[in-house]
Amino acid sequence: MTFDNENILIKEAHPRLTSSGDRDRFKELLRKRLIECGWRDQVRAMCRKFVKENNGPNNVTFDMLVNQVTPRARALVPDSIKRELINKIRENLHRQRNQ
Amino acid sequence: MNDNGCIHLNNFKAAKGTKPYKVVNAFFVSCTSFDARRYKATTCVCFTCGKPGPRMHSCLHCIYFGCYAGHIQDHSKSKKHFLYIDLSYGNVFCAQCQDYIYDREITEIALTNRVKEAKSLGVSVPYIPWLPNHNEAMALKRLRKRRVISQHTTIGLRGLQNLGSTCFMNCIVQTLIHTPLLRDYFLGEKHKCKSQGSGKCLVCEVSKLFQEFYSGAKTPLTLHRLLHLIWTHARHLAGYEQQDAHEFFIATLDVIHRHCMNGVEDVEKKENGRCNCIIDQIFTGGLQSDVVCTSCSGVSTTIDPFWDISLDIAGTSLQTCLERFTRAEHLGSAAKIKCSNCRAYRESTKQLTLETLPIVASFHLKRFEHSSQIDRKISTFISFPAELDLTPFLSSHRRAVDVGAADNNNAPEGIFEDNRYSLFAVVNHLGSLDAGHYTAYVRQMKGSWFKCDDHMITRASLREVLDSEGYLLFYHKTVLEYEGDVS
């Protein structure tokens, strides 16, 4: 993504999606999809494993967990879900622009 | 990990209370109003770099937003403001403890605001899992017996003895026992009975039955008490001859529904006057009937509750049967209806659509034809899918199609709507009209099917299920949505 595109995203699209509530609706939709496809369970298992390997929750901080799990968790998100969300967000932005 | 916070957060709360957290949460974590969303949209960027992330945090001590890429940490260090709130989830970070802190009071505020947010957005309220309180946690510790449910478990699978042509009852009982939400209701012991111990309440009997099914025992059960109760409460089913499984299904729902009403359960009527008992919560949908006068185009709409949908055998698949069911039908000159607008009997068209969808959608394929001349069974193959989207048959969707999708700009809610259903039980009738037998296929877990033939339970493949003839088809909503009762 070029700087210009990113700028447009931050200056225009992001506030519009937030104030209309659609950003939260998309978040909710994504959450549902990730639960349905088993992603959440997989990530939860990864987290449990990491905590166990480090001798329990008292020895693990949130940042350690995030650094460890994020790359693999991201890779586990099915392409079909990414595509669905991107298409829906794109459609939503087009419609808002045309209004 | 406990949820009593940390000394730093507790000191902060003692000095300033929870108000600062409440305000930040209601405006920037879970926006509880339109105004809050507007504030968030225009101001919620990192005060240092101007970007909306990654992982935005808000200082709990002063007005400062910063990203977790370093700016919130810088602010915390230079100002000695050690507590900050993660704006995605509402968790509080303590820089002195170097981690997020769990605090029951804070968690409760966050939860209340999440429910308010969902209401303000018109989306389903987030599912709140059960968290054991102190007493419950202790009770769980004392109970040493644990049963781990693996993916290959056979718990919940038990055969049913045939008491003399009672396979029609057995296959419906197997279906009800494997209805996910009904199972959760009964295993959660939600039925509180007024006439406890009288032995007359069918809901109590079903409740017992669930306990026996899920006890882990494997021997077949005998349903004599259930049969007796049904005979007493639905007299038309009494006797030893073979009955229609569909008729039995509806009669059973009706008796359970009536007995729920007599119990002390809080079956308050909802504002729309609909019964709120477990049967109605799970099985009831609304069928809309639009009658359009061909002279004045006036529409008269009625909505009737339904527990199942009976479909004529037409076409080759469940979908085509449903399309036919929801098609506008011209009522000829022989069936004129009085139009309230024209004040005269007119020809009209009638269309049925699904106004509200139940959680369990039950379809009855009309395979038995009874007419004055002949009674016969129609064995035509009708294919049915494992996953079914009911959106095309909804009243709202049909209207949009009729208006023309092109100029239909008010459909965006549709993209957040989810009307997908998954097959979880199929009842089959084998043989002929007068010498038949019923069996059921039930889904034990996702992708794991079993055939229930009275006392015999055998593993089945999804292919086998989908290739079967199909008499009653049961679909469960794939994604559940919740209504909040937190005000």
Image (cartoon, coloured by chain):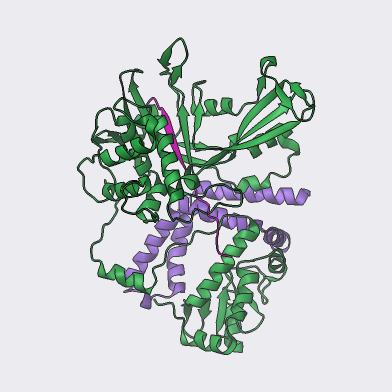
Chain colours: A purple, B green
Q: Is residue B333 above or below residue B191?
A: above
Residue B410 falls in which quadrant of the image?
top right
Viewer-proximal residue, A14 or B191? B191
Residue at 43% from the left image edge and 72% from the top image edge: A64
x then y, percent, for residue B315? 52, 20
| Residue B91 in view here | no
Q: Is residue B457 above or below residue B70?
A: above
Q: Is residue A67 magenta?
A: no
Q: Is residue B475 magenta?
A: yes
Q: How many numbered circles does the render carry?
A: 0
Q: Quadrant of the N terminus of chain A?
A: bottom right
Left or right of residue B436, residue A73 in this image = right
Q: Is residue B249 above or below residue A48?
A: above
Viewer-proximal residue, B191 or B299? B191
Viewer-proximal residue, B239 or B141? B239
Q: Is residue B416 above or below residue B33?
A: above
Left or right of residue B227, residue A89 in this image = right
| Residue B425 in view here | yes
x then y, percent, for residue B257? 45, 44
Q: Write down the region rendered in magenta.
A: B469-487
x then y, percent, for residue B212? 26, 48
x then y, percent, for residue B160? 25, 37
Residue B400 falls in which quadrant of the image?
top right
The residue furthest top is B373
Principal SS element in the magenta part?
A: loop
Left or right of residue B187, residue A10 in this image = right
